[in-house]
Amino acid sequence: MATVGGGGSASNHDVQESSSAQSGARVALSNAPTAALGPSASPPVLAVHREPGVYNWQATKSSLKERLSYLLNNELLSDVRFVVGKDRQAQRIPAHKFVLAAGSGVFDAMFNGGMATTTAEIELPDTDPAAFLSLLRFLYSDDVHIGPGTVMSTLNIAKKYAVPALATHCVEFVSKHLKADNAFMFLTQARLFDDPQISSLCLDTIDKSTAEAVNTEGFTGIDLDTLCTVLERDTLNIRENRLFEAVVHWAEAECSRQQLPATSENKQKVLGKALPLIRFPLMSVEKFPTANPKPRPSNNDRPRCCLRGEECSINRFQHVESRWGYSGTSDRIRFNVSRRISIVGFGLYGSIHGHTDYQVNIQIMESDKHLTVGQNDTGFSCDGTSNTFRVMFTEPVEILPNISYTACATLKGPDSHYGTKGLKKVTQESATGTKTTFVFFKSPGNNNECPNVIAIGLVLAPPWSAGSKVVT
């Protein structure tokens, strides 16, 4: 943290109330009657205050910076006073019009413009005194004195009074000190002061370290609109189960703020518009309490995981037919790929009987080792059309080239549509020209060739830094 440079014993002292005679001398207007001035006369001039007994102070200051720093928050030679803040927190801060006007176009217009003020005391009730003093300190000495608790209010006031150099220092301070454990604190302040640049920096940090950020007190203290802004993001690097747990903690804290019992109903109530933004389809069914709402089609099922890049969907079927029944056995298909990818989910056909909810277990196993590398017990809703419906893993499943894997889907529900004339080989070419080839095989003991599993969503390698967020 930078400190204020220079200054003698009188700088930065608290302003004491003076006698009425002294106060009158300090800010008195010229006593010439206004009417006698005539239409061309200049506006009345404020008297400049000189502290009694303070002479030749300049001799002890070897530079202009030292001399101006000495005058900071000092009644000596002051010709204006600001009353900053409200009620008991208000501070009276003396200042010097010339210094302020030399450093700020807004102050210049305030004191010297066509509608210049002539009042001796200017009230700023909605301004933070510490931030205002930081602004004055910069104007008097070029010193920057900010900290985590004042940087955003200082940035706001630097913009308000058109001091871009100080604003730049504030942005650099946030960039340097922004971490997961304070990202939500800075984000809350950035949204309060409507600063999109700082908001963007905070959200980027939250994306990269989501799990750590949502476990801080700053997260439980954010408002509902900020919570919704975060939950809308596809780029959060966290499993949906863990994110949901953090959201529950936020709801408990909000119930406390609203003096409500932290019941399931009240938690849903305070979550309000944030509730549909929780991606329940990405969560295992047993991970959320039965009191929570059942996932509906309106709930987003795009995985977050900070996967950036191209979205791909592999469709091996050429036709769609109706009436495929389920008896508790799995539909399976074996496959291998030509390059390293990550699979984010399956596309499954839905009911032929209109809107229906299915329970489903999806798995990917390494065929030769009979090793499960990814699975999810979840559910999905369909609308009765012959479209496919996305069923996602809770996190992407890494698939290595030239290894045989088996995709399995076990559904509980009524008869569905199903795919026919499945291709044995499907090649997907990315926008950059990279090709990924899937080769499909029958799974031993499974003669239906997995007619329900239509699509395998994939993430182009390297799977944790490039690829798809969703599968369609």
Image (spheres, grey):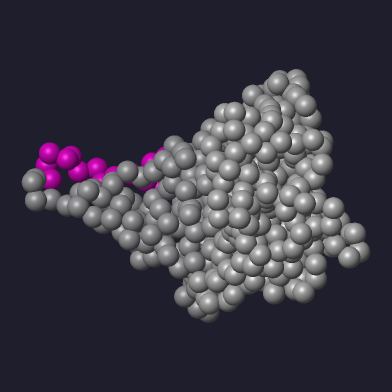
Q: Is residue 58 left or right of residue 147?
A: left
Q: Nearer the viewer, residue 384 or 194?
A: 384
Q: Nearer the viewer, residue 316 or 57?
A: 316
Quick one: quadrant of the N terminus?
Answer: bottom right
Q: Is residue 27 magenta?
A: yes
Q: Residue at x 28, y 55 (%)?
A: 109
Write down the quadrant of residue 122 in the picture: top left
Query: Image height check: is 435 above or below 424?
Result: below
Write down the quadrant of residue 278 in the picture: top right
Q: Residue at x 74, y 49 (%)?
A: 448
Q: Is residue 321 magenta?
A: no
Q: Nearer the viewer, residue 355 or 334?
A: 334
Query: Image height check: is 148 above or below 138?
Result: above
Q: Residue at x 59, y 75 (%)?
A: 435
Badge count: 0
Work out whether residue 7 can be spotted.
Answer: no
Please identify the residue farthest to the right as the structure is shown.
Answer: 369
Q: Is residue 22 left or right of residue 374?
A: left
**Residue range of the region highlighted in magenta in the rendering:** 21-37
Query: Image height check: is 165 above or below 303?
Result: below
- Coordinates of residue 111 in the picture (x, y in percent): 30, 54
- Coordinates of residue 320 in the picture (x, y in percent): 56, 46
Work out whether residue 431 can be spotted.
Answer: yes
Q: Residue at x 74, y 68 (%)?
A: 336
- Coordinates of residue 20 in the picture (x, y in percent): 44, 37
- Coordinates of residue 472 in the picture (x, y in percent): 57, 52
Q: Is residue 94 left or right of residue 98?
A: right
Q: Main secondary structure of the magenta part?
A: helix
